[in-house]
Image: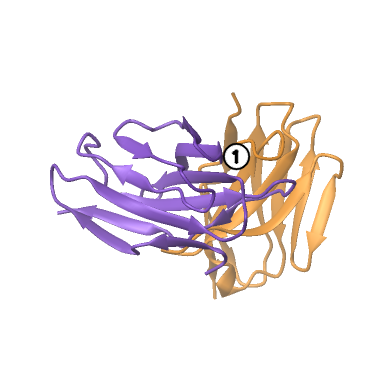
Chain colours: A orange, B purple
Amino acid sequence: GENVEQHPSTLSVQEGDSAVIKCTYSDSASNYFPWYKQELGKRPQLIIDIRSNVGEKKDQRIAVTLNKTAKHFSLHITETQPEDSAVYFCAASSYYGQNFVFGPGTRLSVLP
Amino acid sequence: DGGITQSPKYLFRKEGQNVTLSCEQNLNHDAMYWYRQDPGQGLRLIYYSQIVNDFQKGDIAEGYSVSREKKESFPLTVTSAQKNPTAFYLCASAGQGEYGYTFGSGTRLTVV
């Protein structure tokens, strides 16, 4: 089955700097890769996703890149702000309705 | 609240007691999921259902039970067989032809 690894587990950056979180997956059939942001005690919220037919997707300060050959994808946050502080989860699935396999999460702290 | 509602928000269980967590969605989604999240941990799949009257065990189903009698509802029962039930429980749903989960706001269960 699919296995998703995520690094780093914790990440601290200064406000205004960039943050990068990386995930690797094992199942070459996976073709959908969402990223979720979870603030303390709240539900995960989808922030960006990418499908296997594209290599990069950007939405304002966040972007996701996908390397299908190497089976890894990354979340990039630029110009970080204190409100970016949260736990971020990556996930992978092979088709609609297939269970997501989540990475273990990265706790991002943006320091003022 | 985002089309998927979990109740109660907080729940306390005595030793040896069964409790049921509610999950209702009005998104007309076919698939529904239950995840457990422990402090500082990722999301672990308990049960999932792709269609009414059918459900499958996830990675940590022992001590839990579910039903899917209606498309809108996917309640989770935490039985007395679950020896360490204190956790944050998240319900999610996914729609036909859509990508990504919609999460409920979660139920925090504590054993007293």
**Looking at the rendering, in which quadrant would you find the C terminus of chain A?**
bottom right
In the current view of this chain or complex, which residue is farthest to the bottom? A112
Chain label for disc 1: A
How many marks the image carries: the answer is 1
In the image, what residue type sits under mark 1? Answer: Phe
**Residue A57 appears left or right of B47:** right
**Residue B31 appears left or right of B16:** right
* Among the 4 quarters of the image, the one containing residue A58: bottom right
| Above/below status of A80 relative to B80 | below
Q: Position of residue A70 (x, y in %)?
A: 76, 30
Badge 1 is on which residue? A100
Q: Position of residue A82 (x, y in %)?
A: 56, 73
**Looking at the rendering, in which quadrant would you find the N terminus of chain A?**
top right
Decide if residue B26 is in sight here. Answer: yes
Task: Give whichever of A80, B101 is nearer the camera.
Answer: B101
**Residue A77 appears left or right of B8:** right
Q: Position of residue A16 (x, y in %)?
A: 67, 72
Task: Give whichever of B76, B60 is nearer the camera.
Answer: B76
Decide if residue B42 is in sight here. Answer: no
Taking the spot 65% from the left edge, 69% from the top edge, the residue there is A80
**Residue B23 appears left or right of B30:** left
| Above/below status of B62 relative to A77 | above
Q: Position of residue B26 (x, y in %)?
A: 57, 61
Circle 1 Cα neighbour tier, 10 Å, few/some/many (<14 / 14–19 / ≥20)? many
Taking the spot 52% from the left edge, 53% from the top edge, the residue there is B72
Label 1 sits on a secondary structure element that is: loop
Taking the spot 81% from the left edge, 29% from the top edge, the residue there is A69
